[in-house]
Image (spheres, grey):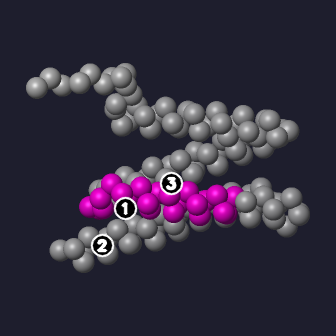
């Protein structure tokens, strides 16, 4: 029996390489979106920072879930939840900022706090799942 040759280049089969590639693509996409929507330098910087924070929270949630014993599908699901929460927080923060209710510092603290809280809740969920499986 012969093994079929993959059409995917060898470097793209490595997890860390893919994470790095998608991180760069996400940062370029966020900065490009901010520029295409008429954003200034301040908004592009915020888009990049938010992209880094969101990416770190999403990858960290996945890595923590796998390390805590979650199957791949559960870790992906937890990462999707963190992404959804961060997206919702970003939309609400932008609406409040455009209405003059929040400053940039308050938005940054809120998004960071929300990311931390989501990771803590998902981490506790993973630990409880691990403890109940034993």
- Magenta residue check for 85: yes
Secondary element type, mark 1: helix
Q: CA distance from mark 2 to mark 1?
A: 11 Å
Q: Mark 1 — residue? A: 74
Q: Residue at x 67, y 63 (%)?
A: 89
Foreground disc of the pair 3, 2: 2
> Where residue 87 sits: x, y (%)?
64, 58
Secondary element type, mark 2: helix
- Magenta residue check for 49: no
Residue 110 at least partly seen: yes
Q: Is residue 106 above or below residue 2?
A: below
Q: Residues within 10 Å of mark 1 (few under 14, many from 20)?
A: some
**Of label 3 and label 1, which has the lower sequence position?**
3
**Of label 3 and label 2, which has the lower sequence position?**
3
Q: Residue at x 65, y 36 (%)?
A: 29
Residue 57 numbered tag: 3
Image: magenta residue range: 68-90
Foreground disc of the pair 2, 1: 1
> Would residue 106 be found to the left or right of residue 125 on screen?
right
> Where residue 120 sits: x, y (%)?
45, 68
Residue 41 at least partly seen: no
Q: Is residue 75 above or below residue 9?
A: below
> Where residue 99 sits: x, y (%)?
88, 63
Q: Residue at x 78, y 43 (%)?
A: 43
Residue 129 numbered tag: 2
Q: CA distance from mark 3 to mark 1?
A: 16 Å
Q: CA distance from mark 3 to mark 2?
A: 20 Å
């Amino acid at each position: 029996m012969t093994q079929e040759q993959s059409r995917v280049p060898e470097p793209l089969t490595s997890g860390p390489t893919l994470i790095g590639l998608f991180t760069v693509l996400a940062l370029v996409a966020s900065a490009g979106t901010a520029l295409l929507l008429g954003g200034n330098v301040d908004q592009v910087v915020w888009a990049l920072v938010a992209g880094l924070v969101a990416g770190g929270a999403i990858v960290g949630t996945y890595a923590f879930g796998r390390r805590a014993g979650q199957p791949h599908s559960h870790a992906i699901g937890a990462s999707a939840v963190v992404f959804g929460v961060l997206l919702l927080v970003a939309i609400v923060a932008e609406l409040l900022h455009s209405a003059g209710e929040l400053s940039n510092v308050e938005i940054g603290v809120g998004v960071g706090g929300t990311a931390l809280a989501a990771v803590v809740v998902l981490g506790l969920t993973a630990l409880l799942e691990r403890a109940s499986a034993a």
